[in-house]
Amino acid sequence: MLVVGPAGAGLLLLVVFTVVEARFAAQPMMPLRLFRIRGVAVGNAMLLLFGAIAIAMWYFTSLLLQNVLGYSALQAGLGQTPAAVTFMVIARWAAAVLPRTGVRPLVLAGSGCFLAGFGWLAQAHADSGYVTSVLGPTLLIAVGIGLTFPTLMAAATADVPEGDAGIIAGLANTASQVGGSVGLAVLATAASARTRMEAGGQSPAALAAGYDRVFLITAGLGLAIAVISVLLPRNRRG
């Protein structure tokens, strides 16, 4: 109930906001007509999922390093540094090649990295080593994040009337943030439920089982992004 109650209230407020914007607002903050643009609707749907993927990568990997492998907070941060550097390098490259490749190839490549990386990360356990069980998969996931983040932002903001560009950019950023917030609540609940099922309570092994469930769910979100990308306009170049 700690999650369901606030989530239900948030959903109700979203419905109220939509009704007010559609029926009563003379100058709506978020013109709903913009969602008739396929790239806007599909791009923001993928950004919602991407936000959950990103939170799973950085937040739950940090918990895995500290609560299961016994790293300090500083060591965990340093352990994630290679992935952060990889993300920055790949994101710059993806933004540069996007006009030539278009959106879908980069999204599919990124989704493949999510599926493989999180599937690999889900094999981690209390006796895992950093290089083989954390560094390898997080580098792969970071490549996926680098490929998809600038690409999805471009997909969600392309083909928009010039006067609405600011609104759409704000919507795209909001979608990824909301996806991260909702994703954190859902994934944390899934991890906690799985941990409680394990013998040993809050032992490293039990916690690892919970985090592994999160990583498997997130691999599924990566696959969902690949499926949704099929709905993008075929001629989309970002």
Image (spheres, rainbow, N blue to C red):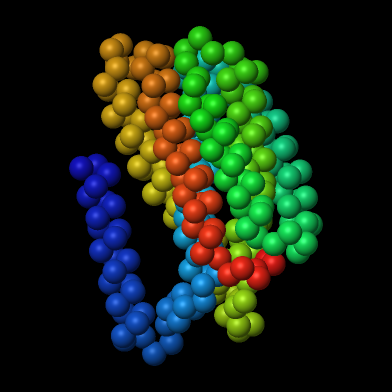
What percent of the width, then of the height, locates residue 59? Answer: 50, 35
Viewer-proximal residue among 172 and 104: 104
Q: In which quarter of the image is residue 112?
A: top right
In the image, residue 233 sits, relative to residue 123, either above or below, namely: below
Q: Quadrant of the C terminus?
A: bottom right
Which residue sits at x=77%, y=50%? 93
Question: Is 220 situated left or right of 57 in this image?
Answer: left
Question: Is 32 situated left or right of 162 in this image?
Answer: left
Q: In which quarter of the image is residue 30?
A: bottom left
Instruction: Work out which residue is located at the far bottom of the displayed protein and give it.
Output: 26
Residue 51 at least partly seen: no
What percent of the width, then of the height, locates residue 162? Answer: 64, 82
Residue 41 at least partly seen: yes
What percent of the width, then of the height, locates residue 120? Answer: 54, 27
Q: Quadrant of the N terminus?
A: top left
- Count the numbered circles shown: 0
In the image, residue 212 sits, relative to residue 187, either above or below, namely: above
Question: Is 162 situated left or right of 167 in this image?
Answer: right
Viewer-proximal residue among 84 and 198: 198
Which residue sits at x=59%, y=13%? 129
Which residue sits at x=46%, y=45%? 221
What percent of the width, then of the height, locates residue 105? Answer: 66, 54
Which residue sits at x=31%, y=86%? 24
Q: In which quarter of the image is residue 82?
A: top right
In the image, residue 47 sits, relative to residue 183, either above or below, namely: below
